[in-house]
Image (cartoon, rainbow, N blue to C red):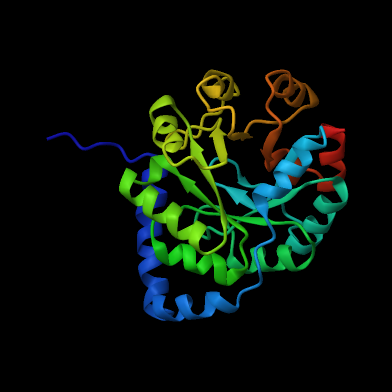
Amino acid sequence: MTLETPTILKKILARKRIEVAERAALVPLSFLMETQVTASKPRGFTQAIKAKISAGESAVIAEIKKASPSKGVICNNFDPAQIAKSYEKGGACCLSVLTDIDFFQGSDEHLQAARNACNLPVIRKDFIVDEYQIYEARVLGADCILLIVSALDELQLKQLHKLAISLGMDVLIEVHDEHELEIAIQLENPLIGINNRNLHTFDVSLENTYRLLDKIPSKAIVVTESGIHTSADVEAMREKKVHGFLVGEAFMRSEQPGEKLKELFN
């Protein structure tokens, strides 16, 4: 009998399922379902992206993250509220905030602090595997959630997508290859993220976006994720008619994230 070597994604998902069970034991799902009704109204994540693109500009989802499994700590002087303000001033249309604790040193408080500090819509960037996390996201004030096709089976993906939409949130569906894209397209979701990072190995290649672009319906908005570090990277994507960008590390390594955003995209 041969044992399969756990990939980074599998390790994250295994831990995430335990984490969700632990959270649910402390705060019951029924409480979240009741509390989400009084959460602040969603700010319109997809609409903010559409508005930027309609104005002929790049729609930048600027990410707030302290660390990652592949790079360790990325930002030592980490203040989510100040970073959010910097991004808003720099021209971001949305924020992405990591809430995973064990692998990215994120937290729910980071999301709340960032959203409260600005007027931008915020996506909860986490590894969602259960409906509990969707209700939790809405209670936290998230305007959008991330659903990763490789982290879910098709039924789970459909159910979690439907639930998020019913709660008024938008959804960014993330794919990495042709098979995952075929599954994502069936949901007719307006936002499709192409992750240039392989979540099993954490290797990055911008070619991944170029490879999948032609297979995406014209009515969907493409968001390229990971690997954007230079103005040349941005221009290469623009030439391919990609106008949605999710960028984190390139900004977070800068002393002034918002200024770095302006430098890359203006």
What residue is shown at x 80% (from left), y 62% (from top)?
118
Q: Position of residue 223 (x, y in %)?
A: 62, 36
The answer, for residue 218, to whether it is visible in the render is: yes
Q: Percent position (x, y) of residue 88? A: 82, 53
Horizontal side of 166 relative to 253 (left or right) equals left
Instruction: Name which residue lies at 57% across and 58% down.
Output: 169
Q: Is residue 102 above or below residue 185?
A: below
* Residue 61 in sight in this render: no
In the foreground, 147 or 202: 147
Quadrant, the N terminus: top left
Q: Quadrant of residue 3?
A: top left
> x, y (%) of residue 32?
47, 76
In the rendered view, tell whether residue 116 sits above or below residue 127. Answer: below
Please indicate whether residue 132 sits to the left or right of residue 99 in the image.
left
Q: In which quarter of the image is residue 246?
A: top right
248 vs 91, nearest the viewer:
91
In this rendering, the answer to whether 167 lies above or below 160 is below
Question: x and y percent of residue 181 in the render?
Answer: 44, 31
Which image quarter holds the C terminus?
top right
Residue nearer the viewer, 71 or 94: 94
Q: Residue 183 falls in which quadrant of the image?
A: top left
At a point 75% along the width and 68% down the height, the residue shown is: 116
Left or right relative to 228: residue 197: left
